[in-house]
Image (spheres, rainbow, N blue to C red):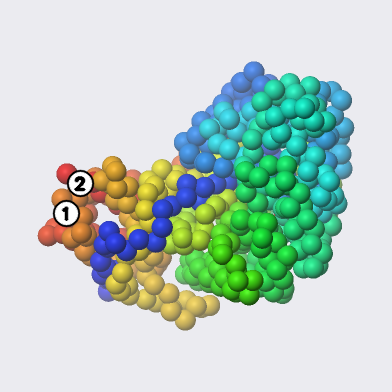
């Protein structure tokens, strides 16, 4: 056995980063593949309710306690004609869906999705089409969704059976408008102008909404971070957030290096914060632009199959697209990415695990009466969403390090703490990302007298490539014994390659 690594830290109640915004545990449903049709909606399935929504899927989404869900895209939104998705279903047109080269039946639209979100105990983060449409269309859609009555589109909504407005609070101003794959892709100047004008008009209709300006599609985009700086020059006064998107994957089949992906996410977040603050300084501004990391996940397993379907078998209705089957190391990566998002709780106020059902998702469904099941990545997300409540505290101290092929030095273990003061509960989230050696944990919590360990939950597997399926879960959390508080110090051992949740409470 290799020598143990060490994580020696102090956690103090004054080492506060910020209150954690629950919306950091948001997710995403796009009209893409089987996310909507055969995912959340499948009339005729034995588990479906009277509106055609799968109750087993709703139960799993509720288990994850997802506070906000981005909709309807994604790339899909950049050619979305929302009017096609409302009103009597039999009159809704089928459309060629160009982003994913599929056929969209429009049988699920705004009304159905907002009903589903209610059932799933979540709220909607809506995106407007700034690809093939613009200011007027965004205004019409907002009026349809949020204006009470007495105007053309509000009255149309009422005529369609929704007396009460949907009151959608968060709106994305387009999607990945810097991407050559995006319908209606824009230059920075074009996007900055249209986003600012759309935001200005939307806030006249409903001053209570919050707006997200599109940032770069990933840190790899050649125009990053100039895109953020140039577009915020236009949008700074009108928007509240800027978006970040990034997907990670073990493309080199080098697990140790793959698990350094959270350092890349950290660098991305820091760079966007610096760029927002640069624009604020330049404008002598008085507000901070917050971050909405509204697409993040592991995504690479399905790339070749997706390419084949879109290129050679287009125009299917809800084909199997982006159906990544996640393994154990992907769950570790998702855990690390969640820790990184929590570390930035002062600026990252929203984030969406992309996506939620069937499409690069923690929840999968089988058609034809089949089951719904939990992928490996379901578990770290579940734990973070369930126990990551309260104030984020940053442990300070030292951790042993190791090298990977693409990163000079990374920590053996990553950690963050969240404290729920009223309930006197403290939760530590930790990943030992060293594949070889256990890490000895020694965390001084003397500023939390009488706190004792309630449970230590661990996700571990002898096989980094182990997957779950409809017929069983080979990756599922277990309770770990032996972690305890002695003389104000939490002591325990973090197994190599493991996700750990240590829950403590004042006794
Ligand atoms: O989540 C899948 C796709 O990834 C989204 O449609 C797009 O915004 C991103 O490129």
| First in sequence: mark 2 vs mark 1 | 1
Kind of element beneath mark 2: strand
Percent across and percent down for residue 41 are 67, 30
The residue that disc 1 covers is 449
Residue found at the very far bottom of the displayed protein: 408
Which of 229/313 is in front? 229
Which of 351/483 is in front? 351
Please state if 356 lies on the left or on the right of 455 as rendered. right
Residue found at the very far left of the displayed protein: 487
Badge 2: how crowded within 10 Å, few (<14), some, or many (20+)? some
Q: Quadrant of the C terminus?
A: top left
The residue that disc 2 covers is 506
Q: Residue at x 58, y 46 (%)?
A: 27
Q: Which mark is residue 66?
A: none
Percent across and percent down for residue 272 are 59, 68
Q: Is residue 90 above or below residue 210?
A: above
Mark 2–mark 1 Cα distance, whole angstroms, equals: 7 Å
CB contact under 8 Å: marks 2 and 1: yes
Q: Is residue 463 something that shows in the picture?
A: no
Which of 152/121 is in front? 152
């Amino acid at each position: 056995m290799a020598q143990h690594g060490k994580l020696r830290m102090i956690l103090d109640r004054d080492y506060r980063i910020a209150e954690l915004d629950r919306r950091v545990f948001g997710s995403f449903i796009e009209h893409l593949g089987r996310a909507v049709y055969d995912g959340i909606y499948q009339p005729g399935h034995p588990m479906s309710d009277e509106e055609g929504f799968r109750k087993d899927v709703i139960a799993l989404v509720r288990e994850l306690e997802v506070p906000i869900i981005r909709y309807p895209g994604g790339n899909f939104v950049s050619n979305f004609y929302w009017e096609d998705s409302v009103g009597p279903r039999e009159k809704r047109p089928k459309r060629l869906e160009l982003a994913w080269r599929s056929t969209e039946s429009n049988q699920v639209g705004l009304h159905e999705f907002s009903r589903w979100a209610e059932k799933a105990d979540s709220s909607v983060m809506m995106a407007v089409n700034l690809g093939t449409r613009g200011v007027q269309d965004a205004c019409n859609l907002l009026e349809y969704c949020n204006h009470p009555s007495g105007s053309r589109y509000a009255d149309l909504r009422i005529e369609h059976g929704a007396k009460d407005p949907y009151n959608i609070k968060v709106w994305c101003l387009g999607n990945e408008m810097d991407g050559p794959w995006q319908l209606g892709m824009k230059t920075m100047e074009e996007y900055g102008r249209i986003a600012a004008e759309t935001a200005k008009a939307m806030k006249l209709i409903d001053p209570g909404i919050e707006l997200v300006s599109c940032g770069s599609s990933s840190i790899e985009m050649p125009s990053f971070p100039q895109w953020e700086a140039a577009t915020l020059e236009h949008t700074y006064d009108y928007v509240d957030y800027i978006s970040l998107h990034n997907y990670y994957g073990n493309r080199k089949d080098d697990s140790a290096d793959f698990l350094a992906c959270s350092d890349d996410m950290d660098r991305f977040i820091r760079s966007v914060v610096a760029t927002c603050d640069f624009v604020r300084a330049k404008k002598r501004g008085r507000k901070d632009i917050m971050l909405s990391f509204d697409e993040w996940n592991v995504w690479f397993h399905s790339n070749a199959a997706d390419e084949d379907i879109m290129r050679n078998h287009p125009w299917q209705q809800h084909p199997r697209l982006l159906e990544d089957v996640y393994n154990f190391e992907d769950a570790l990566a998702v855990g690390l990415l969640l820790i990184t998002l929590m570390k930035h709780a002062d600026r990252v106020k929203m984030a969406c695990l992309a996506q939620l059902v069937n499409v690069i998702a923690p929840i999968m469904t089988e058609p034809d009466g089949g089951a719904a099941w939990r992928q490996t990545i379901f578990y770290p997300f579940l734990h973070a969403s369930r126990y990551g409540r309260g104030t984020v505290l940053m442990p300070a101290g030292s951790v042993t390090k190791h090298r990977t092929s693409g990163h000079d030095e990374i920590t053996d273990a990553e950690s963050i703490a969240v404290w729920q003061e009223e309930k006197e509960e403290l939760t530590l989230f930790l990943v030992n990302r060293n594949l070889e050696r256990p890490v000895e944990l020694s965390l001084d919590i003397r500023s939390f007298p009488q706190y004792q360990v309630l449970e230590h939950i661990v996700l571990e597997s002898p096989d980094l490539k182990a997957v779950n399926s409809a017929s069983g879960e080979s990756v599922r959390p277990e309770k770990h014994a032996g972690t305890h508080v002695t003389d104000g110090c939490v002591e325990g051992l973090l197994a190599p390659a493991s996700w750990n949740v240590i829950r403590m409470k004042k006794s």
